[in-house]
Amino acid sequence: MSVLEIRDLHVTVETDAGITPILNGVTLTIRTGETHAIMGPNGSGKSTLAYTIAGHPKYNVTSGSITLDGEDVLAMSVDERARAGLFLAMQYPVEIPGVTVTNFLRTAKTAIDGEAPSIRTWTKDVKSAMKNLRMDSKFAQRNVNEGFSGGEKKRHEILQLELLKPQIAVLDETDSGLDVDALKVVSEGVNRAKAESNLGVLLITHYTRILRYIHPDYVHVMVGGRIVEEGGPELADRLEDEGYDRYLPEGEEEP
Ligand code: ADP
Ligand code: MG
Ligand code: MG
């Protein structure tokens, strides 16, 4: 059992215009085995929350805390966060020239577990995870993110999720740019990780579409860098019907 606790988190970002507050007191608790959806209009701060959990240097925590099983996540390096059991999909978004998917995954696995997996089980695990995600075995020999399509990037994310076996995963807009078939395959991967290793999921999404495949236990609505409403899956259904307009100031529409 692991628990990620976010307490009254305030985050600013520095722009040409100066220091701008983005998160204005976010409180959220995610336990292993639970799936939480964070939904909200564009620009409400959802990705900022994901980047802050990931330790992106651009985002400055001015007050509040993030802990994993009581340990101060904000004091950890990005690598330490991964070793502690956090999975942050946007952690490795860049192309890594000359590093194949298979070597990349093995290096990540070794870093997280503190020892290299045995070649035999590793090869078998990678093959079966790729098969589950309906990925061509040639994919393992491609260089990380080099020329990956949107769908391939997402599958690669979920492949990491399946192999690295984190405690809690933060998935930001995992549904964006996926056709329905790819969305199903990716969702099945997340659901497998939930079933097999009791993964806790923080699923960040603007649209309700992915929630038909990955069922949230809790739904939180973020507007203006705050959580303004919380509920169960029925809240997502209501957002699907009504959109976000009622959370926005009178006369204002979603940017
Ligand atoms: P969401 O993911 O909900 O669409 P974001 O967290 O991406 O929202 O953005 C929230 C607000 O913070 C937006 O107004 C955005 O322009 C601003 N913002 C986020 N990241 C940066 C950044 N790196 N530089 C400047 N502004 C940013
Ligand atoms: Mg956005
Ligand atoms: Mg976003």
Image (cartoon, grey):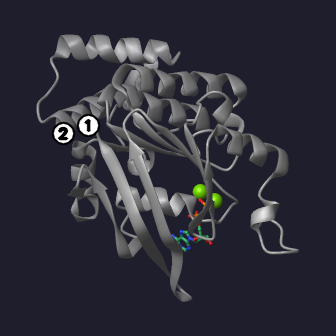
Front-lying residue, 77 or 205: 205
Q: Is residue 176 left or right of residue 165?
A: right
Question: Quarter of the image holding residue 121?
Answer: top left
Res 108 label = 1
Q: Residue at x 39, y 23 (%)?
A: 140
Res 79 label = none
Q: Is residue 60 above or below residue 187?
A: below
Q: Which residue is mark 2?
A: 111
Q: Is residue 105 above or below residue 243?
A: above
Q: Residue at x 37, y 40 (%)?
A: 168
Q: Residue at x 54, y 31 (%)?
A: 152
Q: CA distance from mark 2 to mark 1?
A: 5 Å
Amino acid identity at mark 2 = Ala
Q: Position of residue 137 (x, y in %)?
A: 44, 14
Q: Position of residue 153 (x, y in %)?
A: 52, 36
Please state the total of marks drawn on the protein image: 2
The quarter of the image holding the N terminus is: top left
Amino acid identity at mark 1 = Ala
Q: Are marks 2 and 1 in contact (CB under 8 Å)?
A: yes
Residue 137 seen by the camera: no
Whereabouts is ligand 2, in terms of quadrant? bottom right
The quarter of the image holding the C terminus is: bottom right
Front-lying residue, 207 or 64: 64
Q: Position of residue 113 (x, y in %)?
A: 17, 33
Q: Residue at x 17, y 23 (%)?
A: 117
User: Tag 2, which secondary structure?
Assistant: helix
Residue farthest along the right direction in this orientation: 251
Residue 210 seen by the camera: yes
Q: Position of residue 77 (x, y in %)?
A: 23, 58
